[in-house]
Amino acid sequence: MDMVGFVGLGRMGRPMASNLCRKGFRLVVNDVNPAAMQELESLQARSAASAAEVAAQSAIIITMLPNSAVVREVVGGPDGILAHAGPGALVMDMSTVSPETTDDLAAQARSRGIAFVDAPVGRLASHADRGESLFMVGAADADFARVKPLLDGMGSTIFHCGPVGSGTRTKLVNNYLAVTSCQLNAEALALSQRLGLDLGRTLDVLYGTTAVNGQLKIAWPAKVLAGDVEPGFTIDLAHKDLSLVSEAAHAAQVPMPVLAAAREAFSTARARGFGSKDFSAMVDALCDLAGIEKPRLRT
């Protein structure tokens, strides 16, 4: 079995890599956090001192990193993955980055005889823990077939969205709706609190109409409405994603006024110290701003 490299063992990458180890894949891993690598070592993965060392040992290299700048440096930098991967290697970036980053790195990879796949992740960190992630994949058909066993090892739902770059672009559309829904939910529940309505009954009504959305019905009852604002996906990262969507929309000349308002709301939450909280905590940020009691479901 070919060695698989995995660079980036954060809140999403660590359980994804762990699931691959448990499914019998041979992994060599790297992260800036030594404790994350030690956790993978307990599952029989090998640690590497750098991303370059991972690339030199691996036929397929997976990256799960925080932003475009880091991905560009780790993958395409002078001492990065592309500089050290062998001919015929494949790089699969699962980060949420700008379309330009994906396109540029894919072009660099092609020039070196290296395949490139973009496969950003849908769903939450809790889904990654259970091996139930959703993947939006941009890849040539042959490359998709090559990475599909790995995707099956990390998730339960896989969409081949089209050629390289399609996964990244689909992820921006998805995250726009997911993140903006949090702001809409925050405003609705803050208003409900101010009006003195019973939260449980209000939610029952919303769940029974077309007003419902996945964040409100699936994610929020287990997170902020239960008093848990520890991050599965932070407000800081959500703000980053809205910025990526804004850049893509400007480049494509698509007016998105709701996006602009939501992004500023997330900016306000970050300025008030909520950036490291789960993005469902947007309702707490708004209630804090307005002096409203935070909504919590009674247990």
Image (tube, rainbow, N blue to C red):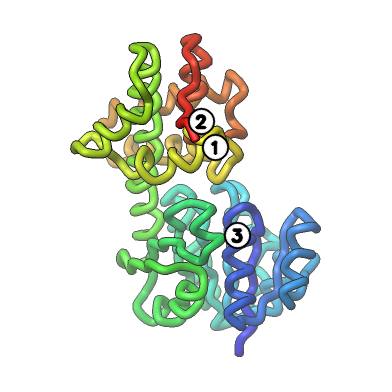
Q: Is residue 70 above or below residue 186?
A: below
Label 1 SS:
loop
Residue 216, how many percent across, how many down? 36, 38
**Between marks 2 and 3, how big is the CA–CA gap?**
23 Å
The residue lying at 38 percent from left, 59 percent from top is 167
* Of callouts 1 and 3, the N-terminal one: 3
Q: Quadrant of residue 31?
A: bottom right
The residue tagged 3 is 13
Tell me, yes or no, if residue 205 can be seen here.
Answer: yes
Task: Identify which amino acid the numbered label 2 is placed on.
Answer: Ala
Circle 2 Cα neighbour tier, 10 Å, few/some/many (<14 / 14–19 / ≥20): many
The residue tagged 2 is 281
The residue lying at 38 percent from left, 41 percent from top is 215
The residue lying at 39 percent from left, 65 percent from top is 137
Q: Is residue 192 above or below residue 238?
A: above
The answer to whether marks 1 and 2 mark residues whose Cβ atoms lie closer than 8 Å is yes
Residue 196, how many percent across, how many down? 36, 13
Q: Quadrant of the N terminus?
A: bottom right
Tag in front: 1 or 3? 1
Q: Is residue 262 left or right of residue 55?
A: left
Outermost residue, front direction? 299
Circle 3 Cα neighbour tier, 10 Å, few/some/many (<14 / 14–19 / ≥20): many
Circle 1 Cα neighbour tier, 10 Å, few/some/many (<14 / 14–19 / ≥20): many
**Between marks 1 and 3, how big is the CA–CA gap?**
17 Å
Relative depth, front residue between 58 and 81:
58
* Of callouts 2 and 3, the N-terminal one: 3
Label 2 SS:
helix
